[in-house]
């Protein structure tokens, strides 16, 4: 599911009843009894009135969309990128908004959608009215749109020949641009900007690898070069696949 589809999905669930521990299905008497025994006061006595209704909790709203069950801490722990809530204006729609014990979905324009508790159910609210501390790029969502024109540098990962490696990247128009120094380290190459990058233009650039010139798409941001991963992989004869937003490289047979 991409981030636009994700937001559309949760928008359709506005008004759904909240019960702690429910994941987006009709709650039965047995469900209520089990959840009450398991979670105590986290499940309100008045939630008994919701038996027979579709119910969901905050992390369950995301799991309902993706089919992958995680709690709010699990979404934080597996996030592709974590940013302070102060930079929410740079977040793509479909990013998660998070605080310890609670999670929602950023819907754009300073608003989020979340299963906000038994008193509210699934609702739309202003981020400024909540106490979220971070926004997350979720592992289980494909992000294909970016809010605004500013590129956002994220801490991410690449998988090369089965090895998971940390990188800085920019995700723009659904394409991965990886910081050239990270790529060079992964590939066992040395970077010397006087000799390795022959020309520096606004969008297209020429990269020299072992005296071979290749054409690449790049983003120059704050003096750092971010190269489109598919361009470099082609030059180095790697196949590129993706696990969500994580690029997976394997040497061609």
Image (cartoon, rainbow, N blue to C red):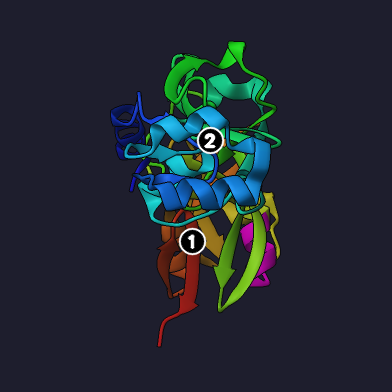
Q: Secondary structure at mark 1?
A: strand
Helix, strand or loop at label 2? It is strand
User: Foreground: 106 or 100?
Assistant: 100
Separation of marks 2 and 1 at Cα, in angstroms = 21 Å
Residue 185 lies within the magenta run: yes
Residue at image position (49%, 67%) is: 248
Q: Nearer the viewer, mark 2 or mark 1?
A: 2
**Above or below 185: residue 102:** above
**Which residue in the structure is indicated by mark 1?**
247
Please rate how many residues cluster around mark 1, counting C-alpha atoms within 10 Å: few if below 14, some from 14 to 19, many from 20: many
Classify 19 as above or below 1. above
Residue 32 shows in the view = yes
Relative vertical location of residue 81 with respect to residue 151 in this rendering, above or below = below
Point out residue 173 in the picture as x, y percentages from the top left corner: 37, 39
Which residue does the image show at 56% across and 36% down from the upper left? Answer: 220
Indicate the quadrant containing the C terminus: top left, top right, bottom left or bottom right.
bottom left
Q: Position of residue 157 (x, y in %)?
A: 60, 58
Q: Mark 2 highlights which residue?
A: 96
Which residue is at 65% across, 54% downward?
A: 167
Residue segment shown in magenta: 182-189
Q: Main secondary structure of the magenta part?
A: helix
């Amino acid at each position: 599911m991409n981030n636009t589809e994700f937001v559309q999905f949760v928008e359709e669930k506005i008004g759904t009843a909240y019960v702690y521990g429910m994941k987006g299905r009709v709650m039965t008497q047995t469900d209520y009894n089990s959840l009450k025994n398991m979670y105590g006061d986290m499940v309100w006595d008045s939630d008994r009135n919701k038996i027979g209704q579709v119910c969901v909790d905050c992390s369950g709203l995301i799991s309902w969309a993706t089919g992958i069950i995680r709690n709010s801490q699990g979404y934080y722990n597996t996030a592709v990128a974590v940013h302070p809530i102060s930079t929410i204006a740079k977040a793509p729609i479909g990013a998660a908004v998070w605080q310890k014990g609670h999670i929602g979905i950023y819907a754009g324009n300073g608003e989020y959608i979340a299963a906000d508790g038994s008193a509210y159910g699934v609702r739309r609210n202003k981020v400024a009215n909540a106490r979220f501390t971070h926004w997350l790029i979720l592992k289980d969502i494909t992000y294909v749109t970016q809010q605004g024109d500013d590129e956002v540098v994220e801490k991410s990962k690449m998988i090369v020949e089965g090895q998971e490696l940390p990188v800085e990247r920019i995700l723009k128009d659904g394409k991965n641009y990886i910081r050239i120094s990270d790529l060079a380290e992964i590939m066992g190459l040395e970077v010397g900007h006087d000799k390795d990058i022959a020309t520096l233009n606004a969008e297209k650039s020429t990269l020299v690898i072992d005296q071979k010139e290749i054409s690449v798409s790049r983003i120059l941001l704050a003096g750092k070069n971010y190269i489109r991963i598919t361009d470099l992989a082609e030059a180095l004869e790697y196949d590129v696949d993706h696990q969500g937003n994580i690029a997976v490289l394997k040497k061609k047979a």
